[in-house]
Amino acid sequence: MGEIDGAQLTEAVLIWTGYKKSTRPLRDNALVLQRFGPEAGAHLLAAVLHLKDEFYQSDARHVAADLPEMARLSVEQFRRKHPEVAEEIAQAFAWCYTFDFK
């Protein structure tokens, strides 16, 4: 994926998901491209989608007793793979994940 600025990656994930701005996950590529431009936006989107795919490898939806536990377990699993990413990224993906598997 190359070097990506952590703050920009966090912002891209938050924009893409709509975390803390929308009542449901947006997952809107166009918003990221609009904010960062076509070249940087495409690079950031590739990283966002890669991290999202890795987050969704979690089995929390199969083993958790409820949504809060599903969120906690999925974040824990993701953080073991990617301790370098901001916690807010993990929380945004957990919000999407629990929305999808509620």
Image (spheres, rainbow, N blue to C red):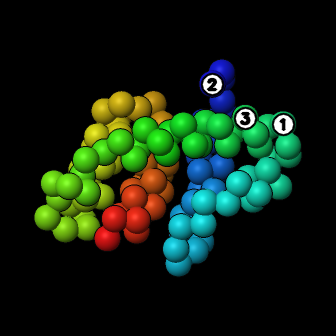
Mark 3 surroundings: few (<14), some (14-19) or many (≥20) residues within 10 A: some
Where is residue 68? Give x, y as percent.
24, 65
Residue placed under numbered mark 1 in the picture: 39
Which residue lies at the image location 35% right of the left edge and 38% below the top edge? 79
Looking at marks 2 and 3 on the same chain, the residue that comes earlier in the sequence is marked by 2
Q: Depth check: 48 or 3 in front?
A: 48
Mark 2 surroundings: few (<14), some (14-19) or many (≥20) residues within 10 A: few
Is residue 78 rendered to the left or right of residue 21?
left
Q: Quadrant of the N terminus?
A: top right
The secondary structure type at the circle numbered 3 is helix
Which residue lies at the image location 65% right of the left edge and 49% below the top edge? 12
Does 32 sit above or below residue 8? Answer: below
Instruction: Say if mark 1 contacts mark 3, CB within 8 Å.
Output: yes
Residue placed under numbered mark 2 in the picture: 1
Mark 1 surroundings: few (<14), some (14-19) or many (≥20) residues within 10 A: few
> Is residue 87 something one can see in this rendering?
no
Badge 1 amino acid: Glu
Q: Depth check: 90 or 97 in front?
A: 97
The quadrant holding residue 7 is top right
| Mark 1 → mark 3, Cα distance in angstroms | 6 Å
Where is residue 58? Give x, y as percent.
31, 45
Residue placed under numbered mark 3 in the picture: 43
